[in-house]
Each structure stands twice: as structure tokens, then as C-alpha cells.
Amino acid sequence: MPDHLTLAYVVFCVVPVGLAVSIGLRQRRVRRALEREDMRR
Amino acid sequence: MVRRWWDWLLIGLSVVMFCAALVVVFLYAPREATMGDVQRIFYFHVASAWVGFFGFFVTFLGGVLYLVRGERRWDILSLSSAEVGLTFITMVLITGSLWAKPVWGTYWTWEPRLTISAVQWLIYVAYVMLRASTVGEERVARFSAVYGVLAFVTVPLSWFAIRWWRTIHPQVVSSEGMALTPKMVQTLMASLATFTVIYVTLLRERMRLEQAQDRLAALREG
């Protein structure tokens, strides 16, 4: 079991990266939907 | 959704500053005499709290501007900042508990600062959930603006909780200054600057996402 300091810094690294990835994935989904909509027109 | 050069600069700066801040926290900051190495949680914990509070302030400001001007951009700013702020406050709660276990002997205690932080977290979770369930509805945007303005009261409450009530939460910043050595202050400042840049980067990206969703909705409607 890692110590509390290590766990805390894992949280500090993982959580902002997690949010960035989540935003990035949502951006990609919207971008693809925009491309599909453009092609449909 | 094209990124400009300053978007890439912000992303690069966030990564570089985060790595540099880690080096400063672990190699430059001195070991605290009483708590030992676990005190190093403090630097990023306080920086996360600052960014969380600032994020909620921007949500408050965006809410006021939306209510006054009725422009969608202020609503986008408000909801984007709430999501980013909530992420940082989540980190504050988790890492605060991880610090508390070796220092207080418990992960959680219902003392004023922690209780207010938990309530604040729930209030903003409700805000983000409300916004996630709808896109660009004016009625929801108006309600959210009022909610965001009222929810902001938890920020000064949380700040003053350790000054107004008897609490076991440490009070590092007081009217007598900071109870830290110069190297600790420098490390804290570096962490604050780093987390502020990360906040701006995440906020910009989140706002770009919302703007793209608006474009998509407009295309589908018309």
C-alpha cells in the first residue's frame, strides 16, 4: 500500500488529466458530429 | 474548433509548469519538522483550493453578467468554470483526507471547514449535473445563473470557517502572515501559479467544447 503522500500526488496528477481527457473526448465526438452534419448537407 | 497558437502555448505551459512544480515540491521545499514528508501534500492541496474557489468566483461573475446582459457567452463561462472548479475541489477533499489520516488519525471529521467543504461540493455537483442534462436552454441558463450566484456564498463561508469557529483545520494564512519558511512560501507560490495556468487551460478547452456543441445544435435545428 503506497503511503498517503504518494497517493495524494497520484490524485493531483490523475484528476486534472482525467478532466482534460474527458473534455478532449467530448470535443472529438462533437467535431465528428459536425463533420457528419456538414457532409449530410 | 481550431486551436490557436496560444491554446497550444497554454497546454505546453501547463505540462511544463506542472512537472517543474513537482520537482520544487519534492526536491526544493524543506521537510517539515513535526509532520514530516506528508506535509508536502499542503502545496498542491492549497493550490487546488485556490483554483476551486477562483473557479466558483468566475461562475458567480458569469452568472451575474448573464442575468444582466443575457448573452450566451457568459453562461458558457459560468458553466465551464463550475465544472473545472468542481474538479479541483474534489481533489481538495480527497487529498485533505489523505493528509488528515496520518496527522489527525482519521480521514474525516465533521468540523466546520470540512462540513462546509462537503456541502459546497454537493451544491456544485448538483449544478454540473443540471447543466449536463440540458444544452443551451435559456430557462435553465437563467436558473443556473441564479444558482451559481447563490452557491458562491459557500466560498467565503469556507474561507472564514477556520477564523470564525473552533476548528482543527490548520490556519496557515492569518493576519500575522504565513506560518511558513521562505522556501515553503516560494514552493506554495510556484504551485499557485501552476494550478492557475492549468485552470485557464482547462477552462478554455471546456468553453470551446460548449461553443462547438452550440454550433452543432444550431446546424441540426436549421
Image: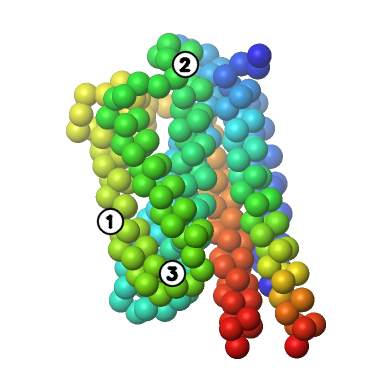
- How many numbered circles are shown? 3
User: Residue B214 or A37: which is nearer the viewer?
Assistant: A37
To which quarter of the image does residue B203 belong?
A: bottom right
Q: Identify the residue under disc 3.
A: B75
In the picture provided, is B127 more to the left or to the right than A24? left
SS label for mark 2: helix
Q: Residue at x 61, y 68 (%)?
A: B208
Q: Identify the residue under disc 1.
A: B150
First along the sequence among labels 3 and 2: 3
Asked if marks 3 and 2 touch (Cβ < 8 Å), the reply is: no
Q: CA distance from mark 3 to mark 1?
A: 15 Å
Asked if marks 3 and 1 touch (Cβ < 8 Å), the reply is: no
Q: Chain of mark 1?
A: B
Q: Chain of mark 3?
A: B
In the picture provided, is B47 more to the left or to the right than B218? left
Q: Position of residue A2 (x, y in %)?
A: 65, 17
Q: Residue at x 64, y 34 (%)?
A: B22
**B199 versus B41 height, above or below:** below
Amino acid type shown at disc 2: Lys
Q: Is residue B3 visible?
A: no
SS label for mark 1: helix
Q: Are marks 1 and 2 on the same chain?
A: yes
Amino acid type shown at disc 3: Asp
Q: Position of residue B89 (x, y in %)?
A: 46, 41
1 or 2: mark nearer the eye: 1
Q: Identify the residue under disc 2.
A: B101
